[in-house]
Image (cartoon, rainbow, N blue to C red):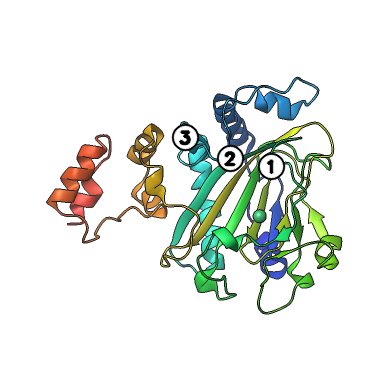
Amino acid sequence: MGRITAAHIDHYREHGFAIVPEFLTASELAEALEEWRQLLPGWVEYCEDPTRPRPELSRSPRRASAFQFPYPGSRLNAITLHPELVACAASMADGAEMHCEQSHLSFKHKGAAGDQDQGMHCDYGNHTLAYPPADPAYWQTAYLLYYTEVTETHAPTAVCSRRHYPEKILWPAHYTREQRPALYDNEVRVIVPAGSLLIYSMRTFHRGTPFLAEGGRLAQFVTYAPAAWKWLGIVGWSAQAIKPAFRAWIESATTAERELLGFPPPGHPYWREETLAGVGARYPGMDMTPYRNGL
Ligand SMILES: [Fe+2]
């Protein structure tokens, strides 16, 4: 059995979310934290012990491409394409071929721009051009991975069971506490140890809560969508392909991993002498054999 169990999937289907405590193994977490230390010197230590002085922040993690896939190391990239994340999302979408439509790091601390008492909302506003139906063919699964411990006071994500919004059409996608107190009164706070995972969908009401004490929280958003539909997804990966880290990642990835980002698969009519030569020139470390063999 995997780390995301049948019980987690059942809970996800029934309530619209599931919490997997300590999804990451100790070594995956340690390697990921080492990469966080490179990206944001001093912040892992500060999140783990908020009595330490808060380090300066040289750049804003909310927009900088350094905080989006692919990352300079290999562990955060591997976690993005973790087979269990792909498999869980695919199972919710009736086994459809999946596309990784998001992977970015989320970084919050008390008093930061992201330290907000958010309203209850669904995330589909910036994950689809259209509307997320209940039909599995269009089912997008979002993951929020926590790299540092989330306590009561450290901005736990709050999520509400589908039971409390049984309506057919989920519009509006945002409610204030005054408009819909039941969503707030029935929220579950995701208070978990480092390495834990929240699974939710574009049809799940949830919100960020504020820090109640000095501290920080390191997390990662990863979202999967069925690959077939162009109206789904938060980013285009070509925007990241210009980063040096992209070349390193794509050269070492498997053909299946590349495909999760939308890269043409072996056997696709895209592959001709010209494209084999061109892609091979752009990414000299890529083994072109699988694409050549598919000709
Ligand atoms: Fe959200």
Q: Is disc 3 surrounded by few (<14), some (14 to 19) or many (20+) residues within 10 Å?
A: some
Residue at 48 percent across and 63 percent down: it is 232
Residue 53 horizontal/vertical position (percent): 75, 20
Say which label, 2 or 1, has the lower sequence index: 2
**What kind of residue is marked 2?**
Arg
Numbered disc in front, either 3 or 2: 2
Q: Is residue 137 above or below residue 222?
A: below
Query: Which quadrant: the N terminus?
Result: bottom right
**What kind of residue is marked 3?**
Ser
Mark 3 sits on what residue? 74
Label 2: which secondary element: loop
Mark 1 sits on what residue? 114
Q: In the image, is the residue at mark 3 within 8 Å of ligand 1 by its beta carbon?
A: no
Q: Nearer the viewer, residue 216 or 60?
A: 60
Say which label, 3 or 2, has the lower sequence index: 2
Q: Are marks 2 and 1 in contact (CB under 8 Å)?
A: yes
Label 3: which secondary element: loop
Residue 194 horizontal/vertical position (percent): 70, 38
Label 1: which secondary element: loop
Q: In which quadrant of the rendered view does residue 61 lie?
A: top right
Q: In which quadrant of the rendered view does residue 215 lie?
A: top right
